[in-house]
DNA sequence: ACTGATGATTGCTT
DNA sequence: AAGCAATCATCAGT
């Protein structure tokens, strides 16, 4: 009768609500879904709160270096995605719940006109669930994609490299050209350079690797640059007060006598630590020289994916 | 949009 | 393990 039916409905309703939040705990352990869930969990998008946002904000506020800034930016974006993901998820759960209730009411009314078996109800509810699970799946999918894009954009240094600051290039070039006969800095020298330039040792290694090969490939052009730096080094070594400290302007070369500094030219790199005092250069933070914002990775609409923007 | 410069990665050699 | 050579992907000036 009616009371019986009503209680059945209620029971189903409860089950519904419970099972929504654990779609993957249901029977079909959809491998795809599990993959998505695992990834979201691994990225910290799903799962328990982890004070991500505030930590990122704190890191951003605390100054620090390029890498860390980017990292914190990345985490901030991730937190954003996470939040949207959760609100969306909640929205879906709510909608599912409401819809189920609605259908229940409908069925209940129908039950006055014709007998409705619990099986039928079950079927209906299942259909609804499947629909909403599909939506959830989609949400998870696009969240995953958004995270992946974010990762590749922020964490893969190669995809988003920045040129070194002018001072850093200056320091590296000075070392390179004053050690042209043997442009292979030792581990300690690399560390020193890394410290001076505010980059990592492996970046120094990369730089010298690139420099050596590119110098070799185009000695003609490099020579001009070389003469510039050797002249600078000499000036610095002798601390010549007369001639102006040379115009540091990198592309100002051209005149400069043909000192043709080949790989052997510069005798011994004894004038190593010198110079670098000469020019003013951009004394401020090096990061204001480079571009500021990446593709607007903010604001997320309904679709989490829009979070990372096009490209 | 195109192009040269440049930092990073990959695969190979020594 | 370090370096070289080729290549990728982005930067930055035009």
Image: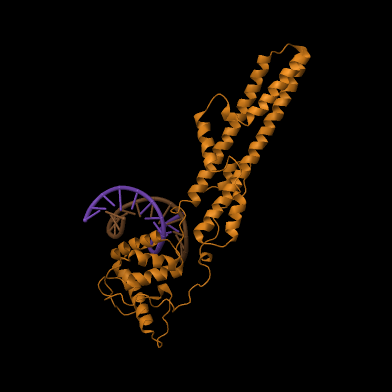
Chain colours: A orange, B purple, C brown
Residue A198 vs residue A2: left or right? left
Percent x, y of residue A50: 59, 46
Which residue is most to the bottom? A242
Viewport quadrant of the N terminus of chain A: top right
- The residue depicted at 56 percent of the width and 54 percent of the height is A73
Percent x, y of residue A226: 33, 73
Percent x, y of residue C5: 28, 56
- The residue depicted at 46 percent of the width and 66 percent of the height is A165
Residue C12 vs residue A85: left or right? left
Residue A148 vs residue A11: left or right? left
Observer-nearest of A93 and A3: A3
- The residue depicted at 71 percent of the width and 23 percent of the height is A103
Q: Quadrant of residue A217?
A: bottom left
Position of residue A234 relative to residue A168, above or below, is below
Residue A255 visible somewhere in the drawing = no
Q: Quadrant of residue A81?
A: top right
- The residue depicted at 33 percent of the width and 61 percent of the height is A209
Q: Quadrant of residue C3?
A: bottom left
Position of residue A35 relative to residue C10, above or below, is above
Percent x, y of residue A91: 67, 36
């Amino acid at each position: 009768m009616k009371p019986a039916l009503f209680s059945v409905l209620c029971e189903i309703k409860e089950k519904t609500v419970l099972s929504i939040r654990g779609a993957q705990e249901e029977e079909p352990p959809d491998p795809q879904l599990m993959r998505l869930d695992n990834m979201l969990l691994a990225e910290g998008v799903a799962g328990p709160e982890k004070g991500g946002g505030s930590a990122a904000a704190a890191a951003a506020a605390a100054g620090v270096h390029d890498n860390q800034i980017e990292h914190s930016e990345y985490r901030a974006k991730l937190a954003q995605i996470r939040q949207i993901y959760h609100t969306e998820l909640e929205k879906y759960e709510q909608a599912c719940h409401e819809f189920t209730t609605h259908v229940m009411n409908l069925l209940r009314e129908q039950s006055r006109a014709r007998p409705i078996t619990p099986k039928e109800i079950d079927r209906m509810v299942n259909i609804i669930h499947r629909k909403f699970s599909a939506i959830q799946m989609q949400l998870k999918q696009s969240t995953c994609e958004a995270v992946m894009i974010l990762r590749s954009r922020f964490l893969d240094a190669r995809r988003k490299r920045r040129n070194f600051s002018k001072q850093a290039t200056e320091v590296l070039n000075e070392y390179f050209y004053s050690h042209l006969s043997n442009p292979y800095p030792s581990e300690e020298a690399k560390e020193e350079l890394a410290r001076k330039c505010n980059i990592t040792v492996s970046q120094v290694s990369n730089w010298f690797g690139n420099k050596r090969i590119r110098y070799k490939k185009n000695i003609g052009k490099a020579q001009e640059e070389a003469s510039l730096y050797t002249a600078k080094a000499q000036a610095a070594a002798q601390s010549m007060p007369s001639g102006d400290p040379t115009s540091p302007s990198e592309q100002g070369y051209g005149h400069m006598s043909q000192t043709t500094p080949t790989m052997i030219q510069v005798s011994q790199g004894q004038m190593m630590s010198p110079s670098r005092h000469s020019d003013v250069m951009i004394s401020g933070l090096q990061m204001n020289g480079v571009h500021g914002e990446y593709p607007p990775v903010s604001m997320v609409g309904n679709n989490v994916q829009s979070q990372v923007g096009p490209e």
